[in-house]
Image (cartoon, rainbow, N blue to C red):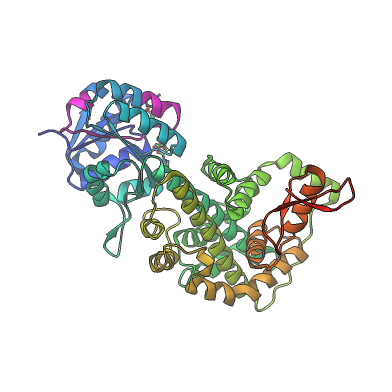
Amino acid sequence: GKARIAVTGLATMGSNLARNLARHGFKVAVHNRTPAKMKALLDEHGHEGDFVGAETLQDLVDSLQTPRQIIIMVKAGGPTDAVIDELSEILEPGDMVIDGGNAHYADTRRREAALKEKGLLFVGAGISGGEEGALNGPSIMPGGPAESYKHVGPVFEEIAAKVDGQPCCVHVGPDGAGHFVKMVHNGIEYADMQLIAEAFDLLSRVGGQTPAEISEVFTQWNSGDLESYLVEITAEVLKHVDANGTPLVQVIEDAAEQKGTGRWTVQEALELGVPVTGIAEAVFARSLSGHTDQRKAVRDAFGASEVVAKPDADLVDDVRQALYASKVVAYAQGFDMIREASKNYDWNIDLGAMATIWRGGCIIRAQFLNRIREAYDANPDLASLLVDNYFRDAVQNAEAAWRRVVVRAVESGVPTPGFVSALAYYDGLRSERLPAALVQGQRDFFGAHTYRRVDRPGSFHTLWSGDRSEVEA
Ligand code: NDP
């Protein structure tokens, strides 16, 4: 018989996804631009399930049941367009093209609209979990027309990670919704990693602890509220020593790289007007770390900052609480961004469902996401995750420790942009009056941009260069 589904692009992600499909009993047709990769997959893993090798895209199309479903797992950007163009020439109306790469959601919107013209269904599916997830169960965030999910949803749910018996896959929404949510997932991942790194830095430089000791701390934290994949792997990285017996973290170059999804998240947040300060600080912290020449120049000019370790009994637990509260803020901001985009593009995204499908398979999987799901299930219209009872209590309980940690960091000269900006965000939202009033006054002064008043309706302008009386605008 013919294959149920196809994968084209058999690098790490594509071949693992194809194996995952085959292991779940789906007959899967496989293709790669360079056929050697397809042959290698069949040689090494052909015994794992029912594969059909295809030398050309035409062969791939011919090997499939109709309506056809083809997953593209090639390099994002131009290569994805090239494959889509070629496929759209040979597919028939009703067939479905699924892009599982890290596409920008705007590209996904464009591609979906173009394929619709040709009667083809297009699904932009965010897939998280790296190579391990692709093979053993990723978190899958498919967007696209609802009818497409009827065909491909059951397959994806079968191969996705499962938590409490529930698949980490749900139809996210139309056109670019899936890739948008995947992008924000990655942005949150940046923020979470940065906060963890700051916690490590404080325990190391203020706490005077060794990487091995800090590894123990993270292992302990991983059995509480902070239980998560990222905390778990942090403990692993910190306890690892290189061939010389030196803690690896002390010999890795301290310049963090990025592939771009964090930057996209911040760019889109700027467009949407959503303050994702935690993600932005994380992206900028990586870029600061990479400016090694500039860092050296400033160190030479001022002398390297000298941090004197001053451990105290409360430091470890204070840092734990600061990490937790800052993390709540980062997730609150990420979910705000999804809600805003959903409104903007009419995606109708269920925020609780996003927390549900991130509980397994993906990099930010964590216990914590159960609480987020409960919060949005109880109230889909939450003004902020911070006001949910559970998170409000958690942040309130952590607040004093959070402030102590920020003070310690600032006094000691340990940079903690994530902790500091998360606290500033919280204080910003909580303030009865913000100095935004003064900013409005300044804008009115130099640009006659007008302001509103707290005591009566309407827009006003003060005649700053005249007699300084107020006029209604
Ligand atoms: P790569 O991003 O390294 O892409 C390599 C694949 O793309 C190869 O199969 C290659 O074929 C194919 N390719 C490149 N250019 C073209 C072209 N012009 N026409 C046809 N095929 C082309 O592979 P990954 O497996 O790392 O990632 C696949 C996708 O999944 C990417 O979009 C990536 O962003 C995304 N992703 C990756 C994750 C990861 O952890 N790596 C996690 C989640 C998503 P050939 O062998 O012939 O060169």
Provide residue 88's location: percent of width, then percent of height.
Answer: 30, 24
| Number of numbered discs overlaid on the protein picture | 0
For the record, the magenta segment spans 59-83
Question: Which of the 4 image quadrants contains residue 351?
Answer: bottom left
Residue 72 covered by magenta stretch: yes
Q: Is residue 362 above or below residue 177?
A: below
Provide residue 138's location: percent of width, then percent of height.
Answer: 34, 50
Provide residue 433's location: percent of width, then percent of height.
Answer: 71, 65
Depth check, front residue: 126 or 119: 119
190 on left or right of 229: right
Question: Residue furthest toward the bottom?
Answer: 313
Ligand 1, by image quadrant, is top left
Q: Is residue 270 above or below residue 355?
A: above
Provide residue 444's location: percent of width, then percent of height.
Answer: 78, 48
Q: Is residue 140 visible?
A: yes
Kindly identify the residue that appears in the image at 90 percent across and 50 percent down. Answer: 467
Depth check, front residue: 407 or 248: 407
Depth check, front residue: 133 or 473: 473
323 on left or right of 165: right
Residue 422 covered by magenta stretch: no
130 on left or right of 473: left
Q: Is residue 253 visible?
A: no
Question: Residue furthest toward the front?
Answer: 472
Q: Is residue 304 above or below residue 425?
A: above
Question: Which of the 4 image quadrants contains residue 31?
Answer: top left
Question: Which of the 4 image quadrants contains residue 152?
Answer: top left
Depth check, front residue: 392 or 452: 452
